[in-house]
Amino acid sequence: MSAITDAVTQVKPRKAVLEMPEYHPPLAGREALRLDFNENTLAPSPRVMERLRATTAEGLTKYPEREPMERIVAAHFGLQGEQVLLTNGVDEAIHLMCCAFLEDDDEALICTPTFFMYDVSVQMMTTHLRKVQVDATLEFPFEEFVQAITERTKLMIVASPNNPTGAVVSRAQLLAIAKAAPQAVLMVDEAYFHFHGETTMDDVATVPNLIVARTFSKAYGLANLRIGMLAGSAELLKYVRKVSSPYNVNGVALDCLPVALADEEYLAWYAEQVRVGRERMMEGLREMGVPFFPSHANFVLMNIGPKHKELLVAMRAHGVLLRDRSTDPGCDGFVRITIGVEEHVTRGLAALKVSLHEIGWSANG
Ligand SMILES: Cc1ncc(COP(=O)(O)O)c(C=O)c1O
């Protein structure tokens, strides 16, 4: 590799940018069965593919119009257009929420381990990120979370189901958290909602500090289009809209969105594939003696122990990618496997069986 030649600059970024963590997902060389990123492992709805093929040259010349689509999406959820903001994936939604609500002396609250982008976006705005660590069960620590709320808490982000644990937080607990901190926004990240079924979406019209995030990257199979949404009080979303670009979501994604939402049959089929596949995976892990955490999402977190890296290498040699979660707090030796359609679960399980044998893994270490 040639060295980078660059003019010497005297410019420094903001202190927060120098100090914030960086997220480097392992993206290189993903030409294999991708059971590493919790994507849909097959395809989006065939109707979405049809809509994509209808993209015209003239259509591409136009700036995208987000608002009409927000009205359609809002109607789908029984909301008004102002109660929905479409975003460039939930990643951008998290970023916009932090920009809109966090001053540098405000506190934000999350539970760890969880999705790493919360860390990145919060620490861009404030150094006061409080993390409540789960115990060995990986269940959401409700009491400790509520106790960690202070009058400086301004933003709380809770994923349910959570990534990478697969644990859920009940609607009753989420509503209690929102009530316990009326000065703060509670963002419930429902990226994996379709694999679980319980939601707080129906509460956004009545709970003034609740905002729900949904993505089209997982069950809908549209991770590459980058589309997500926030639903919540029109007043709060007005501030988030203010800090977003008017063209944050591209027009191709906007065109596909109503088609994806309307094909409920496809969505139900995919969610059922995952539900059945998840049971098969958990049963297979039980048979192999691999400890795992019961999951409500499209992935399962297992405890491989000291041989976790060896397992990833062996699985890659068998054409299957897994995600090492060992550096997540409290997750030493943990590896995550995505659940997809039947054939992919079968291939994942078969590769796991051979790979565990090859690396000489046993339940006792
Ligand atoms: C909990 C959670 N939220 C959000 C995202 C990102 O979603 P998007 O692709 O919409 O940015 C992920 C992706 O892995 C996730 O696990």
Image (tube, rainbow, N blue to C red):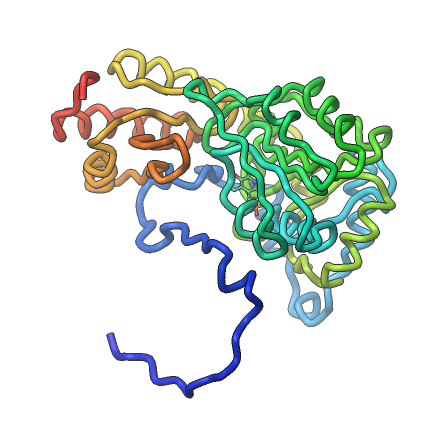
Residue at the spot x=76%, y=48% of the render?
Answer: 85
Q: Quadrant of residue 196?
A: top right
Please name whichever residue, 135 or 236, is drawn nearer the observer in this view of the structure.
Answer: 135
Of residues 257 and 177, which is closer to you in this image? Answer: 177
Q: Position of residue 9 (x, y in %)?
A: 47, 84
Look at 34% across and 85% down and name the residue there: 5
Ligand 1 visible in quadrant? top right
- Name above or below for residue 105 compared with residue 287: below
Q: Is residue 59 left or right of residue 239?
A: left
With 153 as the anchor, is 350 left or right in this view?
Answer: left
Q: How many marks?
A: 0
Is residue 181 found left or right of 341 in the rendered image?
Answer: right
Whether residue 205 is visible: yes
Q: Quadrant of the C terminus?
A: top left
Can you give x and y, in whole percent of width and height, for residue 68 in the image? Answer: 82, 52
Q: Do we see residue 255 in this rendering?
A: no
The x, y position of residue 148, in whole percent, is 63, 30
Please report the residue visible at 79 percent of the width from the left and 38 percent of the height from the top: 183
- Please name whichever residue, 284 or 210, is drawn nearer the observer in this view of the structure: 210
Quadrant where the N terminus is found in the figure: bottom left
Which residue is at 49% across, 25% downward?
Answer: 134
Question: On screen, 35 above or below 28?
Answer: above
